Image (cartoon, helix red, strand yellow):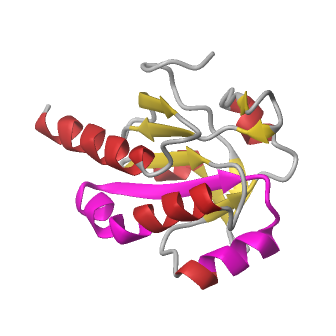
């Protein structure tokens, strides 16, 4: 299982604009990588909109926010447009990146889990938050960790 202090596994996935997003290309800035179950469900919408509403705070802290689910690029495009999301959503159709990050399934294994990773500018995992029910807490926790990293 991935732990704080581990190197974040590199990957490449397609964004809603059709561009390739490669984690290694983000070196030099922090990344908040959040895995979520499904576009347009209540908890996932609340989480995405909370990240949207605080996106400038994350930018000011030198971090990019990136959401990943196994929904299609088309689903991500609709979700992004509907909720005016300013950050990329990545389509992990086969769940390979979810497996790479060892994100557990939830609700008796029926749903993909909700896990957020805070990755520092050097590509090291600095925080992992796993909670299905506290969707918006992922945003607050990620912001808190980034603020603490700036103090160090």
> Residue at point 47% right, 32% down?
129
Name the side, left or right, on which 113 lies relative to 71.
left
Query: Which quarter of the image is occupied by the N terminus?
Result: top right
Q: Position of residue 12 (x, y in %)?
A: 70, 50
Residue 146 visible in rendering? yes
Q: Position of residue 98 (x, y in %)?
A: 72, 38
> Residue at point 50% right, 57% down?
47
Q: Position of residue 67 (x, y in %)?
A: 58, 56
> Residue at point 52% right, 46% down?
33
Q: Nearer the viewer, residue 18 or 65?
A: 65
Query: Which quarter of the image is occupied by the C terminus?
Result: top left
The quarter holding residue 45 reads bottom right
Q: Which residues are magenta?
A: 52-80
Residue 27 visible in rendering? no
Please check the rendered image and state whether residue 75 is part of the magenta-colored stretch, yes or no.
yes
Name the side, left or right, on which 104 lies relative to 132.
right
């Amino acid at each position: 299982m991935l732990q704080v202090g581990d190197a974040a596994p590199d990957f490449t996935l397609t964004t809603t604009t059709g561009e390739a997003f490669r984690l290694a290309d983000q070196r030099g800035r922090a990344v908040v990588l959040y895995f979520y179950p499904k576009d347009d469900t209540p908890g996932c919408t609340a989480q995405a909109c909370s990240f949207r509403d605080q996106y400038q705070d994350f930018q000011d802290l030198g971090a990019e926010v990136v959401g990943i689910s196994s929904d299609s690029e088309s689903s991500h495009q609709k979700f992004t447009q509907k909720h005016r999301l300013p950050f990329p959503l990545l389509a992990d159709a086969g769940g390979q990146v979810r497996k790479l990050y060892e994100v557990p399934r939830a609700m008796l294994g029926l749903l993909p889990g909700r896990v957020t990773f805070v990755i520092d500018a050097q590509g090291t995992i600095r925080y992992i938050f796993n909670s299905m029910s506290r969707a918006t807490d992922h945003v607050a926790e990620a912001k808190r960790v980034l603020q603490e990293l700036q103090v160090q």
